[in-house]
Image (cartoon, rainbow, N blue to C red):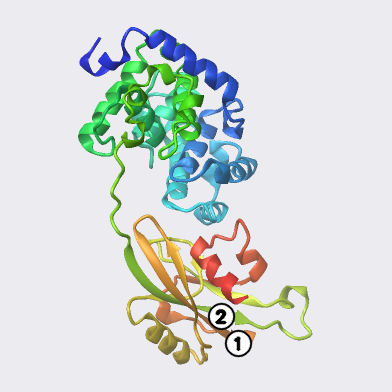
Amino acid sequence: MANDAEPLLADAPQQATALLGWYVRQQRRLPWRNAPSPYAVLVSELMLQQTRVETVIDYFNRWLARWPTVADLALATQADVLAMWTGLGYYNRARNLHAAAQAVMAQHGGAMPADEASLRALPGLGPYTVGAVRSIAFGLPAALVDGNVARVLSRWTAFAGDPNQPKGRAHIWRLAEAWLREPLPRAQPSAWNQALMELGATVCTPRSPDCPSCPVLAHCKARAQGLELGIPPVRQKAAPQLVRAAYAVIVADPVLGAGVADSAPVVLLGRRPDDVRWAGLWEPPGVEGLDCLDVLHARLRAEGLEPSAPLGPIVHILTHRRYEVLVVPVHCSRDALPQLAAFGYPELRLQTVPDALGKESGLSRLAQKLLELVV
């Protein structure tokens, strides 16, 4: 056995049997585990990256109901794809999923490929996602490592290195690959990989591992040495960059005596350009920067609009940025709606507030927070 596989030891068959048996009994019933097609696995894995399982379930079900096959998704517009992703965050995942579906149609005749090279060539598919599709959908002995798997394998072997650093990451990947050379995991790669992830997500958690409930407690070196809380080492996160911004929620009053379509107040929204953060999503007109409120006021008054006193600030935290946002309410009549040329939006639209706050509106979560504060 290779050096990187040395920690598996002679009791690997018992350890594998214990984990797989536990997974059969205790696995969560999740919709993407029901007869997983390669396309469904791809959708679920991209949705699950950096998102809680409980959040993804509804999105996954609605997505598959709207686009049940890769061919259906390939024919969708990017605007519809982003709208369906509303509130899920990390919108590049949606763009990559859409682009991958189009590539599968153009390059593979609509059939998801199973070989590693072809999958890696699809937009947005890294080593983890490729391993998930190959093992879960195609039953191939392909390794995968996400945060849960890295934590489980690190604790099993009392590996003190950092799996988020290149050297530690390479070690954990080699260990994951070594497990799939063992007879039982190799025979059940889908169950094995999902069992590792399930154990990390529900039992072998980062801060409060439920070691007494662990099916492989007897095989865990970190637990035996009292090191489970320090393995893997806690990541030191850099302080997020502060971004100050101001947005105007422009509410146009109903048209008196009009039909139903014009009888409700609407908000004016702009679609963000394709080369910026939240590309293609919709939002109230806004400005970023230290002087954002002054600039916003000047632009609104240049359009003939009078801003109200700002509300907030709203705090909105992304992985690397902390937004502190002031919200400026503006009311006007329909015939006084501005063109907002100074804001640089490629497209404007009017939308009722309930629709703008809906699950398929195409607004970022921050944009929806702004509306919720005003209306």
Q: What element carries label 1?
A: strand
Residue 264, disc: none
Please report the residue visible at 61 percent of the width from the left and 56 percent of the height from the top.
359
Corner quadrant of residue 6: top left
Q: Position of residue 214 (x, y in %)?
A: 48, 24
User: What amino acid is found at the position of numbered circle 1 in the picture?
Assistant: Cys
Corner quadrant of residue 156: top left
**What residue does disc 2 label?**
250
| Residue at the limit of the structure toward the front, as seen here | 226
Q: Is residue 144 left or right of residue 285?
A: left
The C terminus lies in which quarter of the figure?
bottom right
**What residue does disc 1 label?**
332
Whether pointer 1 and pointer 2 mark residues with C-beta atoms closer than 8 Å, the reply is: yes
Q: Position of residue 235 (x, y in %)?
A: 30, 45
Q: Is mark 2 on a helix, strand or loop?
A: strand
Q: Position of residue 3 (x, y in %)?
A: 21, 15
